[in-house]
Every structure is written in structure tokens, then in C-alpha cells.
Amino acid sequence: MGQFRLLWFFFLCLFGYEGLTKGVLGLASNWGLQSTHPLPPNIVVKLLKDNGFNKVKLFEADPEALKALGRSGIQVMVGIPNDMLASLASSVRNAEAWVQQNVSNYISKYGTDIRHVAVANEPFLQNYKDMFVRTTFPALQNIQAALIKAGLGRQVKVTVPLNADVYQTDTGLPSGGNFRPDIHDLMIKIIKFLQDNGGPLTINIYPFLSLQADPSFPKEYAFFNNTASPLVDGSIIYTNVYDANFDTLISALEKNGFGQMPVIIGEVGWPTDGDPSANVDNARRFNQALFNRIIQGQGSPRRRTPPDVYLFSLIDEDNKSVLPGNFERHWGIFNYDGSIKYPLDMGNGRTIVPAKGVKYLARQWCVLSPSASISDPDLAQSISYACQYADCTSLANGSSCGNLDAQTKASYAFNVYYQTMNQMKDSCSFNNSAVITKVDTSQSPCRFEIMIDIGKHELAPSSHKSSAARMESLLTALILVLALVICGVH
């Protein structure tokens, strides 16, 4: 069957493959790895493919993720964390070593289709107070030089994912867009460098954060299908903040002579918990409309050509920093275990499907003992201890578990700690105020989770193959090589 599919691909190359695929867009997503119990990478890659994602962005060069993505058909953007910028900026040799270890190695050994290196992550956030202003551009230059030296200058492009606060408008309209005065000259240098080297500009846009940060922000304007009053900018009418924000960037680019600069939306999405506006209904409403736009190839009023859009995010991360807010751990369209949060139409007649092959710990929970007293002075300390080492963000006011009574909140805290500690025998004690139960005490929408059993997952299948299987693989590979040569894929 595999050879038949490749032969079909071969004939498509000969007889109009380009025409058949023109205008067909895939889905792209961020894959965050800040979890206490991450899903095995091979399961995540299968989850991506099953749901129609053909591009993924990693925030760091995680070895197991990059191996699992090898020969998967998924294009990869691999990130460089901000704490590495100083080292990479100080020495081109450091950049060469990073490229060899994290790009060349995975392309050559594992067939990982790395297309972009994302240098830094929102390095010019105003909250950072110029911490990375002096190192971002030199690091970018050195990584580009290292890619060229490695013979990857055409295959792998550099970019810098930036927060939308790098541009602004003094008129309150998208047409007034320009780059922030304090970094204007630096932005022009970076954009010129990216343009000269064929790299895109990457921008993160968050309508949720616009709503969350400003109590007076019109809620409906944060969504695509809304009843909000439109924003009129000359002959253009804006019905949502996403388009208005994106076109503010496009105006800034046009003002500075970069009207044709390619742009990627590096992050956009909506969380499901940790804030009154972060819930399943709002997330489903926003993300479904976002997917519809991507599938339909819809651009913005000022730039009709649609950009690549990377959803934020694929899976919840229970170990992510909550400094910006409790919602930071709940951006995924999937729960921590790859289970579905809410229905989504993924296009082409597909509906969202969950991860397959996930193994769990025993079906048991740690809860407050019936004999324990809520007035016990040690109870508050036990809850605080549990939440220090486990994710209790769902207990916050306005969150999915915020309306639980005091006893059930204590049970939630004890259980999430117990699960995070892999159900270890001594992790459900809390001064004898907790007990283990086989009864699920979840109260919708609050879920009492059972953690993934990471010890039960095989990291990789057996490499043993029969001679017949090896011959089949060889024949398949030969057909693929012939097809790629004729199609000119490189």
C-alpha cells in the first residue's frame, strides 16, 4: 500500500501536482514541553498528524521531540530560549555548535524537516526592561552565519518571534501603526536582515490578553464572529481586534519600506481555565473561528494573502510559569493527556480526535478524609504545601474549580499533588487528613485528574525488521527519492 501511495505521488509530480495542491493550507501549532508528566513525543506527533497539523513550533531544541518529528511529514520551527542569547551573541563558534547539535544533527540523522530557527522568544517585551535588546540581533546574525556554514542557508530560515507590543499606533487606528520609538531602529535592522536572508517576521497576537488586561475592552471585539461595534479606518472596517492588530503591524512595515515582508503569526489562541474569561465556551468560539479562517485561506483587510498561523497551544502545560496569570497553564486545545477539551471542526470533514495509546496511573484519587475538620489549623498549611508543588490554578476565583466548597477544594489540592507525585504511598497523608478513594469526585466543570504513567510508555518501537520488511522499505525509499528528484522537492 505504501508503494502505491508513493507511485501516486510520483504521477502527480509528472502530471500537475502543483495545480492540485495550490491553495491547500495545513494547520500549525506550538508544542510546549513545560509539563511535569509530558506526553511521549511519538504520541504527540501522531496526535498532530491525526488532526491535520503539518507545521509545529518548539520553544527549545528538545531531543526526543525532534527525533519523534523525524520523517513525520511535519515541518518544524525550533526555538532558542532567551537565556541562550548572550552566549550565541558573543561567539559565532557557539552558534555553529548550536546549529550542529540542534539542526544539522536532526536533519541528517533523523530526517527532521526543520524549516525555521526561532531566535529568542518575545525578547523586546517592555516588562524585560531592555534585558535582551543588545544580544538578540547579534545572536540572530551568528545563527544565520552558522546555518550558511553548515550548508543549510537555503533550507532553514531564521526568524525572531516578537510580541505585538513592538509596534503601536498613536492614532488608535491600524493605519497609524509604527514600531515602538525605543526599538524602532533595531527593528528596522532586524527586519532588513531577515528580508536579505529570506526569513519571515514572526509576531504573537493575543486577543485574550487584550480582553484580560483591560476591564473596559469590549469583549465581543476579541472574537471573530461577534456583535461588536466595528472600528472604521478610512475605507477599511475592522470587526475584530485580531485583524486590527495584524494590520497595525502591516502599516508599520509599509511605512518603513517593507510592505512585502512575509509575516508568520507565531502564537494565537484562547485558554480554558485560570481566569473568568478563560473557559471552554470562549476558547471553542475563538479557536473554531480561527481554524475556519485558516482553512478558508482568509487574510486581513490590508494583506489578503493569509499568513502561516501557529495555534497556541496544542496541550496544557502544568509546569509553566504563572507570572502572567493562572491561565498560562491552560492554553491547549487538548488536556495534559491529549484528551479533547471541546469539539472542533478541523476542516476537510475532520473532527478533532484525542491522543491514542496514553497510559495512566491507577484509577484512584487522594481526597480529604471524612474525619478531617475544615477548621483544623494545619489544613491550610497542607493545602498550601500541595499547591506549592502541584498545579492548583483551577482553584482560583473564576476558574473551573473556583466554586467548590472548602472540603472539595482541599480534596482537589490533595489529589493534584498525589497525582503529580506519581501516586507515591506517602504523598496522600497530609498529617493524616487525607485518604485514597476509588470514587471519582470530579464536579463538572472541575476535573479531578489521574496522571499519565510515564514509566509505562515505550520510548521507541523495536528496530528489528524481517528481510521482507527491509526490502519493502528499500523499494519505498527508492520510489520516494525518484519522486522527489522529479518534483524538485528540496
Image (cartoon, helix red, strand yellow):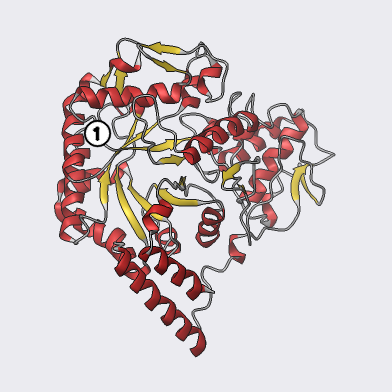
Q: Secondary structure at mark 1?
A: loop
Can residue 126 be seen here? The reply is: no
Q: Amino acid at mark 1?
A: Gln
Quarter occupied by the C terminus: bottom left
Can residue 120 be seen here? The reply is: yes
Residue assigned mark 1: 260
The relative height of residue 168 versus residue 386 in the rendered view (above or below) is: above
Q: Residue furthest front?
A: 15
Q: State the image coordinates of residue 337 (x, y, percent, origin top left).
A: 61, 51
**Which picture quadrant has residue 259?**
top left
Q: Residue at x 26, y 49 (%)?
A: 157
Q: State the image coordinates of residue 67 (x, y, percent, origin top left).
A: 41, 64
Q: State the image coordinates of residue 267 (x, y, percent, origin top left).
A: 42, 37
The relative height of residue 130 versus residue 356 in the rendered view (above or below) is: above
Residue 277 left/right relative to 489? right
The relative height of residue 140 versus residue 207 in the rendered view (above or below) is: below
Residue 173 left/right relative to 89? right
Q: Nearer the viewer, residue 36 or 220?
A: 220
**Which picture quadrant has residue 243?**
top left
**Which picture quadrant has residue 479?**
bottom left
Quarter occupied by the N terminus: bottom right
